[in-house]
Image (spheres, rainbow, N blue to C red):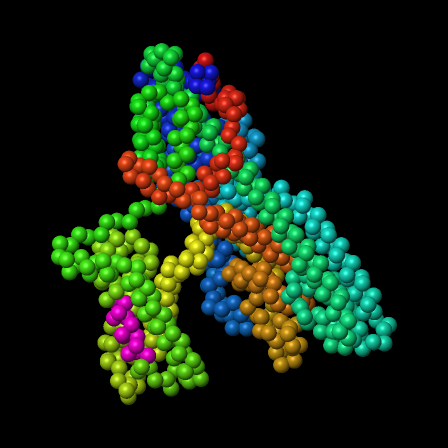
Amino acid sequence: MAAEAQPLLGRDRGGGQARSGAASSQELCIDQAVVFIEDAINYRSIYHRMDAGSLWLYRWYYSNLYQRVLSFTIFLILALAFVEFPSSFTRTADVRYRSQPWEPPCGLTETIEAFCLLVFLVDFSVKSYLVGQPQLQENLWLLSYFVVLVVSVVDWIISVSLTCEEPLRVRRSLRPFFLMQNSSMMKKTLKCLRWSLPEMASVGLLLTIHLCLFTIIGMLIFSSGSQDEAQNQERLAYFRDLPEALTSLFILLTTSNNPDVMIPAYSQNRAYALFFIIFTLIGSLFLMNLLTAIIYSQFRGYLMKSLQTSLFRRRLGARAAYEVLASTAGLAGATPEAVGVNPENFLRVLQKTQLDKIHKQAIMQKVHSYGGRPLLADEFQKLFDEVDKGVIKEVPPMPQYQSPFLQSAQFLFSNQYFDYLGNLIALGNFLSICVFLVLDSKLLPEERDDFVLEILDYVFVLYYLLEMLLKLFALGLRGYLFYCGNVFDGFLTIVLLVLEISTLVIYRLPNSVWKPKQFGSLSLWDMTRLVNTLIVFRFLRVIPNVKPIAMVTSTILGLVQNFKSFGGILVVTYYVFAIIGINLFQGIIVPPGNSSLAPDNSSAVCGSFEQLDYWSNNFDDFAAALITLWNVMVVNNWQVLLEAYQRYSGPWSMVYFVLWWLVSSVIWINLFLALLLENFVHRWDPGSYKQLLVGNQKINYQMSVELMFRDILEEPKEEELIEKLHKHPHLQLCR
């Protein structure tokens, strides 16, 4: 296989650089191989410029420093929405009590925004130069990047020229694009959603037909000419006309107004319940869950396609590095029989590659196992499978004590049963707090006797301190800090100790007639509440000792680590809809008064926006808009918001909220469930834990998703890889 492959010469077609000598050419090949390997490790495209200057610029662009600056810039420009007009710097979002917010002077946020746009302009310029003009013209994301930058700069100039008094800022809605274009996983997620749209549209059509059909049937059943009192009550409440009937059943599809919508008819005749039950069974339990199944199925397909693409990029980058390093053998005067990669050259490349130490050691160990002979193509490819193995660190050794008594004490306090005892004590502390909360639930803070509770708190905190010291003795400092649970316990124990000492200094030692007055900003009851809140948090230490709960917790933590792309999609959707909501609904929710359409609370209809005091659910600033969108996404009582905004702004507002419900509750939540199921299955798979050989030491590691599915993915054929390398716009084949 290696003999048939044609090595690549690290030479840029456009540049046609002349060789200054074998040494400089070999050094260029080494640098090219480093970049190719880093591309393979990070699943990046290899189609970029490969001359010496471009390689330096490319590695600088993907350096940790530049990527952190770019990420901070994206965060900064997104965070401007909280500061810009309308500012979110008020204590409350309630329109009745909200004070006049602080507004930044014109030019302050615009200056920060100009800096961010300048960074993005540099980012676009570097990307465009590195990929070259042919690739730039075919890359829709980069072309869109350019368009968004142009529109943002023009809109910024207009804003400054109008002294920040323009009614609409288009660039605010475009800011989330900077986040999307910087994340390959978010781009893949959007592509997955695009693949799912036809199937989702078919289910959406079924839902629409189902909704319209039952709306017409409901209008006929609860007709206005009927003499049945139940029919008339239902008609007047929910089926007065076609739009109202359609809205009532649409909300019932989300079960938000169930059973309210059914009660007027059902209270008179139980047979009317069949209409609503059949509608809910077909719509909510069948069609909505079918939509979930479709999105999950598409996500699995997307996951496999994404993994297949990642595998191809890994193999292509590794093969490009192999060909470049194999060409150095010819430069060094090696014979054709010695086709392959010189291990010494590869180790030079590996030392310059940005890779963590443990994986470098594993790859070096594998290279040495070949006995110093040239590495063939297949062997070279398999070296990089070690990168997909996430290493789990080994427990540091415990201190060595010479005294038999200390050895026995060390064995006792490092035993898991000592942890069980600590969990039992924590449970007792937790239950004691619950008992006092129940006993004092009807007493005011100044009427409560905190004597017994404070004494118990002192005792428990002293035990926690003793437990921490004994574990430090048994495990040593490194061994104690190795476990996240110990770090969590130790931090809370120190905080609790400081609080208890502060309480003792301020309020003295508790006694049976202890009724101290308040000193400073915190009363005794406030400090007691703070201490007991931290104690409740400390009770979470029992989670690792309950295996099913520990597995679920690890799944949740894994989700936090792997949900960057999906969390990014959520941020983008929230951001865009919040900005649109501000432009549409800012200032329409006005507190009761002479100039308001809102009735006084005493005269408001029961269950209405005004009667429920939902005044904080508005779009008067960015933070309030986010919370309002969250409340709509949860769909609990969202019909109250729909009805209120229809009254205050008009029936067209229904379109905005329905679109938000479709994007957030239907699409994103189902996408979240799909990833949750995939991650859960992976975490509970016992085959996802194996061993990694580093030197003479076996280290446990957890398989990545790429390595877990490696057996069922199709390995790229050598002909495909060579063909792709032939099409590289900045490299040419040597022979």
Q: Residue furthest bottom?
A: 513
Count the numbered circles shown.
0
The stretch drawn in magenta includes residue 437: no
| Residue 634, image quadrant | bottom right
Main secondary structure along the magenta-highlighted residues = helix
Give whichever of 386, 139 is nearer the camera.
386
Tell me the residue at 70%/58% (across/down): 283
Q: Nearer the viewer, residue 700 or 243?
A: 700
Q: Position of residue 112 (x, y in %)?
A: 44, 49
Q: Is residue 550 left or right of residue 472?
A: right
Q: Position of residue 164 (x, y in %)?
A: 52, 54
Q: Please give left or right for residue 673 compared with residue 281 in the image.
A: left
Q: Quadrant of the C terminus?
A: top left
Q: Residue at x 28, y 36 (%)?
A: 696
Whether residue 116 appears in this view of the structure is yes
Provide residue 240's location: percent of width, then percent of height: 78, 69
Residue 728 versus residue 321: which sits nearer the camera? 321
Q: Is residue 300 left or right of residue 696?
A: right
Q: Name the residue rendered at 80%, 61% in the picture.
A: 216
Q: Is residue 424 left or right of residue 650?
A: left
Where residue 697 appears, x then y in whole percent? 29, 39
| Residue 459 among those drawn in magenta | yes
Instruction: Report the magenta residues as a range.
Output: 453-465
**Residue 520 visible, this angle:** no
- Residue 14 vertical placement versus 575 (above, below): above
